[in-house]
Amino acid sequence: MRIEGPELDSLRAIAGQVEAVLKGTAGTEFVTNPVRLARTDLRVAIDRGKAGLLGIPTVEIDRTVRLGLAGLEAGKLREGAGDARPIVVRLARAEGGRASPAELERVYVTSQNGSLTPLSQVADVSFERAVSEIQRHNRIRSVTVTANVQTGFNTDRVTRQVLGGLSQVNLPSGYRIVPAGEIESREDSFGNMGGAIIVATFAILAILVLEFRTFRSTLIVASVIPLGMAGGVLALLVAGQTLSFAATIGFVALIGIEIKTSILLVDLTNRLRAEGMGLEDAIRKAGEVRFLPIVLTSLTAIGGLLPIALQGSGLYAPLAWVIIGGLVSSTLLARIVTPVMYRMLAPQIVGTHS
């Protein structure tokens, strides 16, 4: 959930409310609020006038503070194996101790003439509150609170529950909460895929027309597409999956598999008619010859996809369920629908004697 607005303090307060809603929603885990804990910075305010009178460059003060707290790399030590390790020089501290501002009281800065001056005489050291990070989205300040969905929970349902809880949050003027994550990526993916799907559909139809050279045969082959689509949607409902980006890819793959099997049936019927067999006999013979190969091909694909579907992966399971459901429905129904469609829209075959 991305919170957008102008002021960092208000963003932090709203992010806290969003974090509480996410934690209180069943099915969420690992809730992360990047601004929950404010960062504390150590501010070193240099008295430039006094430093100038004492002949102390500001860069020397900066170097000395870094030497006292973090340490400075003075060189490298090359070991016998050829590995080089940095030599860091810093103030000595207790075993396992961490750097603290109190250590700066023991720090002296060097002037240009070599004299030593306590750091406290030329700089004021204090703590100040600072933000851990400043995020921007489309040049607007934002804070993104994230959470993972637990295994066994549907991402879309959990998101709807979270949005229902966030509807109770009172937002100041100029602030808004944008559902990001899965919803935003889905919209972006579907928006970019729209044109590609249209182009692919026309390309498939054009290939079918070039293959059969008649629009009737193309229509007969394409008649199996709605049958598989219905089976894919039903499989998603039974499995409790949503129409995600992966499921959409599954529908595209399913269309290709369906058309392939339908081409085998229609092509054999056309060839039998071209050899002189009657329309009814050609339809019956093609159905008998192609029935077993089509069924075995579908069962093989279903068997290969079942482990992926039963694994329950949020990325691959929807794709597998769509193809499985579509293959089951198209394999069963297309054996009835395709012969009927061929009988109703029988194309003209060169060389037919029927």
Image (tube, helix red, strand yellow):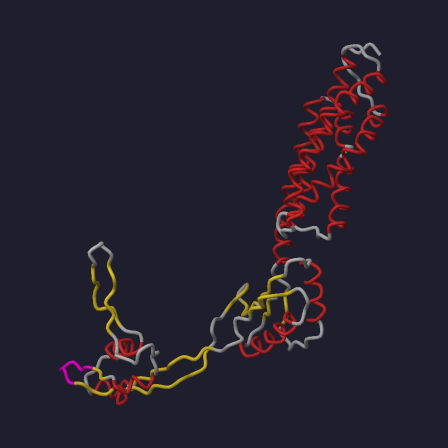
Q: In which quarter of the image is residue 96?
A: bottom left
- Tell whether position 111 is magenta: yes
Q: Which residue is drawn at 29% across and 76% down?
A: 66
Q: In this view, does 311 lie above or below 65?
A: above
Question: What secondary structure is the stretch in magenta mostly built from?
Answer: loop
Closest to the observer, 275 or 352: 275
86 vs 41, left or right, is left
Closest to the observer, 288 or 277: 288
Q: Quadrant of residue 173?
A: bottom right
Q: Which percent across, then down, holds residue 334?
A: 79, 31
Closest to the observer, 10 or 173: 10
- Tell whether position 224 is magenta: no
Q: Which percent across, then down, holds residue 216?
A: 78, 25
| Figure disc tally | 0
Locate the C terminus and report the quarter of the image it occupies. top right
Q: Which percent across, then down, holds residue 9?
A: 54, 79
**Residue closest to the far front:** 95
Q: Which percent across, then down, holds residue 199?
A: 65, 38
Q: What stretch is highlighted in magenta?
A: 110-115
Q: Is residue 297 above or below residue 130?
A: above
131 vs 148, left or right, is left
Q: Is residue 301 above or below residue 174?
A: above
Locate the N terminus and report the quarter of the image it occupies. bottom right
Q: Residue at x 64, y 38 (%)?
A: 304
Q: Quadrant of residue 151?
A: bottom right
**Residue closest to the far bottom:** 121
Closest to the observer, 158 or 172: 158
Q: Which residue is drawn at 74% across and 43% down?
A: 232
